[in-house]
Image (cartoon, rainbow, N blue to C red):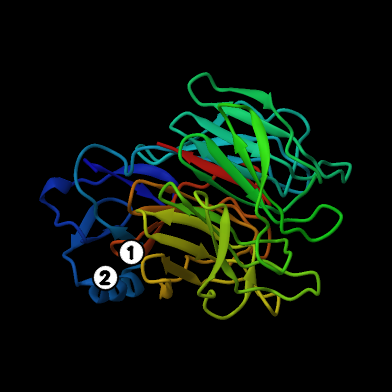
Amino acid sequence: MGKYKFNPFTKTLDKVGLDLANVPKGSILCFDGEKWTYLPPGEAGKILKAQGENNLPTWGESESPGGPGGVAGYGFAEGGYSGSYLSDLDRYSDSNYTWSSRKDLISPSRRSLGGFSLGSNYGFAEMGMDSDGNTLKDCDKYSHSSDAWSNRQDSPDPARIEVADFSLGSDYGYTSAGWGGAYLKDCDRYSDSGNSWSSRSDMPDPARRYLCGGFSLGNDYGFVVGGRDSSGNKLKDCDRYTDSSNSWIGRTDLPSPARQTSAIFSLEEDYGFSAGGCDEYSNDMFDCNRYSNSNDSWSNRSDIPFPSRQNLRGFSLGNDNGFIEGGNGNGYLKDCDTYSNSNDSWSNRPDMPDPTRQALAGFSLE
């Protein structure tokens, strides 16, 4: 990343003072307030010792050179709750580690909404709850190239909150489950080219809300995981939707514990991730688990950074990097952290703009 590295302590891009082209990928970088040093891969124990003795902050692994920044593409945070209902739309660029404000959502401000993206230019905000406690059917489309929102066809009845979303191909977005006066198992598909919604096969029992979320793999498979049923039980369910056959099938459950309101993202065309969340005893979670569709199996991955949190959001950029943003962990958060699947490691990214928030939605555009 050239001669700059994001400093998670000062939230700035700082000069490295050495040429990263000559630093082996996977090295551990640290900064003592004046200069940068590094240790080659496998020397993490030494830097942790140095940190304890000299108060040197530790850094994530070095990345390939090529100018300041990380992964190409943009992640977005939309709406949410910070003590008040939000209409904010904020954009994160990992290529230069910066957040910027974009055009606010169309009124009303809302929380517990859904979001998905279609193609490389369009993001969507749908449903949710406004500040008067009304559940919504709104569906709004964001154009990145023009930084503008437009109203689209309302989602089918009932209005609802806390849905799981995913998208397949460049034309279809899906919303499933949630709460709309009752716990739901509806699945509805939005066609952007037709600006229309159609009902699809219901999800398997049980009806559920507070889902961890949804993710897609390839152009035919969507997944929904976790949540809470109408008896108040947290869930470990993982269900897969096949668009070509309009059918659902149960897949291997999430590892224990059962959970709700995790962040969800997918990488490559085989892996889905659940990060953070709230367990069956209402504890905030650090857990990160990876699902492989080809093996129908889950595996534990490195825990998310402090603090544990729930009601956060996830998105992915490229084939190797997932991101988590916002949430609630002993207070509302504006943290943004990234996960490298190839290294099974997390690193800090710049905080989201104020305010801190939970119950937000998000999407990514590449």
Q: Residue furthest toward the front? A: 245
Residue found 14% across the figure and 54% down from its top: 23
**Picture quarter with the C terminus:** top left
Q: Considering the numbered disc 2 on the image, is that residue within a helix, a strand or a loop?
A: helix
Residue found 47% across the figure and 62% down from its top: 273
User: For this rendering, which residue is in front, 84 or 237?
Assistant: 237
Task: Please determine whether, in this image, residue 291 is positioned above or below residue 103.
Answer: below
From this viewpoint, is residue 337 visible?
Answer: no
Report the side of 162 relative to 142 (left or right). right
Residue 47, numbered label:
2
The residue carrying mark 1 is 56
Q: Residue furthest toward the right? A: 132
For disc 2, the neighbor class at 10 Å (few under 14, some 14 to 19, many from 20) is: many
At label 1, the amino acid type is: Leu
User: For this rendering, which residue is in front, 197 or 208?
Assistant: 197
Q: Earlier in the sequence, mark 2 or mark 1?
A: 2
